[in-house]
Image (cartoon, grey):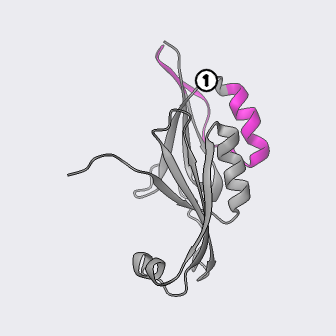
Amino acid sequence: MIKRLDHTGLVVEDLAAAVAFFVELGMELEGEAEVGGEWADQLLGLEGVQADIAMVRTPDGHGRIELSTFRSPPPTTPPPREPVNTPGIPRLTFLVEGLDDLLERLRPHGAELVGEVARYEQIYRYCYIRGPADVIIGLAEDLR
């Protein structure tokens, strides 16, 4: 039986840049660590795992993202840069305040709009951006 969603994991090329992006988004750095060894190899089904991780959490403390970058083994393919409707493409969505200001603050961190900021009735202003490792991030501003 599931108790809760503990965290989402995201592999990135530049850990410091990814942490900076999510901190600018409004998340808090919870901690950083180096991982590797037999237990990591067993868990991930890889050999010679050496990775750096950082855990960031939402201000309410309920959502966490584990950001990781691997020193070894090296990745075999680049990050996916597929359209938003591709099956299996991860998407994270956050409820935000001040959507326009947030977009301006995230642009220097590499954020780019996937489409446009759209209004869903009188309920949300919503957009998708590309974030670290080209992950698609939804930003929804509640208008109610």
Task: Give the residues in magenta.
Answer: 100-125
The secondary structure type at the circle numbered 1 is loop
**Residue 86: quadrant of the picture:** bottom left
Residue 44: quadrant of the picture? bottom left
Name the residue located 73 percent from the left edge and 55 percent from the top edge.
Answer: 17
Query: Where is residue 51 shown, x and y percent of the image?
Result: 60, 73
In the image, what residue occupies the spot 69% across and 26% down? Answer: 100
**Residue drawn 65% across and 38% down?**
25
Where residue 28 sits in the image (x, y, percent)?
A: 62, 42
Q: Vertical placement of 141 versus 109: above or below?
A: above
**Mark 1: few, some, or many residues within 10 Å (few <14, many ≥20)?**
few
**Residue 19 at what x, y percent from top left?**
67, 52
Residue 132 painted magenta: no
In the rendered image, which quarter is residue 97 located in? Answer: top right
Residue 69 pos. (x, y %): 62, 68
In the image, 37 versus 71, the foreground residue is 37
For residue 5, say whether it is visible.
yes
Residue of label 1: 97
Residue projecting furthest to the bottom: 47
